[in-house]
Image (tube, rainbow, N blue to C red):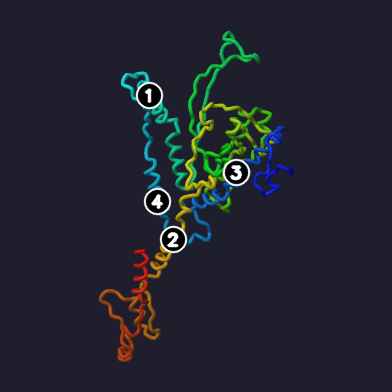
Amino acid sequence: MSQYDAASTSTPGVIDSLEKLEATPQGQRDRWVQEIEFAEKEKKKFTTQARRVIRRYIDERDAVETNQRWFNIFKTNTDILEASLYANIPEADVSRRFNDMDDDVARVAGIILQRAIMQDMVEPNCDFDMVMRQCVSDRLIPGCGIAWLRLETTTEEQPAEYGVNEDGTPFERIVSQEIALDYVHWEDFLWSPCRVWAERRWIARKVPMTRDALVKRFGEKVGKSIPLDYEPKTNVIGDANTPRNMLLKRACIYEIWDREKKQVIWLSRGHDELLDTQPDPLGLEGFEPCPMPMLANLTTSNCIPKPDYMMIQDQYVELDEVNNRISLLIVACKVVGVYDRSAEGIQRMMTEGYDNTLIPVDNWAMFAEKGGVKGQIDWLPLDVVVQALGQLQVH
């Protein structure tokens, strides 16, 4: 265990000099492994709460909760909010900052941009609508919704007469270029621990990749040396929310965007060195390929979200208890009573009695002396049960 290993101490801030640590490729890799470990540790409580909330939303129960009668109004409330927040693909609006009457160039440019954006959003191969719905759902249920942008570029080699690069390879021409929108699962997104979002030093996401994808992206030598270690984690035994029956093995690759050095890093915990490092590939004003995630219930003390459900869980639990008691009282609300065992006619009256049918009674005088039917049978007092049931339903 090295002196920089996160497991060697519980005190935050175990590294005093990044320059010294990153002097070697191994040190660079160790630095980012520790960054990931600390970020996951900071996010652990939120992850546990979020998984619990998702189980509640889809009414996933364990053996202890099977016989409970839940009043799952949380799902209904969430669905109503989701429909009100995002119902249809939005209309793009590109307007001029200065509405000069004779500025036809800016006016036409705005129209062109607006039509180009709308065309991209409504194309069948564009995932904009689906990603937005998934992000809104993640904001309302676990409390963290993330969308990620990628620049997809297709090139082709030019003929030799157009010239070659310094290494002798022919020039390449861009054939097509477009922006792809990715949904990032709330558990696969990480950021450096901070008080407010503006203080973050880096952001990252987990990307599961098959062996073929690894070889294509990082080359045959590196791609075949990366362990296929991707396995979604869960803290609930038998949790059905995480896919378990996956045919292909995959590796967990971390794509890290370092805001301080303006570079992108690809990392696998099972590999001895960083897989790849590139300078700012997009040249965006904000550097990062994603906006600030939709984080629920933030404070200025720690930039960790808290699911909406956790803020009102006591009221939801109270509704569950009331609903469970109502269910038990409904089961108890039935015609049942006791009778004198010696009065056989009473039992026959309940089991054999039909319309216009008389049941003979032996020793009528004694039967009448005991008060007749009223003196031989007594019913469960349903008025108390019905009264309690009515009060619970009003509640």
Residue at image point 61% right, 38% down: 252
State the image coordinates of residue 101 (x, y, percent, origin top left).
31, 21
Q: What x and y, as percent, mark residue 268? A: 64, 37
Which residue appears farthest toward the left when viewing the image?
A: 356
Q: Amino acid at mark 2?
A: Asp
Q: What's the CA distance linking mark 2 and mark 3?
A: 35 Å
Q: Which residue is mark 3?
A: 39
Between discs 3 and 1, the one toward the N terminus: 3
Q: Provide the residue designation for mark 2.
A: 320
Say which of marks 4 and 3 sits in front.
3
The amino acid pointed to by label 1 is Gly
Query: Looking at numbered disc 3 in the image, what kind of residue is underneath it?
Result: Ala
Q: Position of residue 357 (x, y in %)?
A: 27, 77
- What residue is shown with label 4? 77
Residue furthest to the top in view is 161
Label 1, label 4: how far apart the Cα atoms are: 39 Å
Identify residue for label 1. 110
User: Which numbered circle lies on residue 20?
Assistant: none
- Sequence order check: which comes first, mark 1 or mark 4? 4
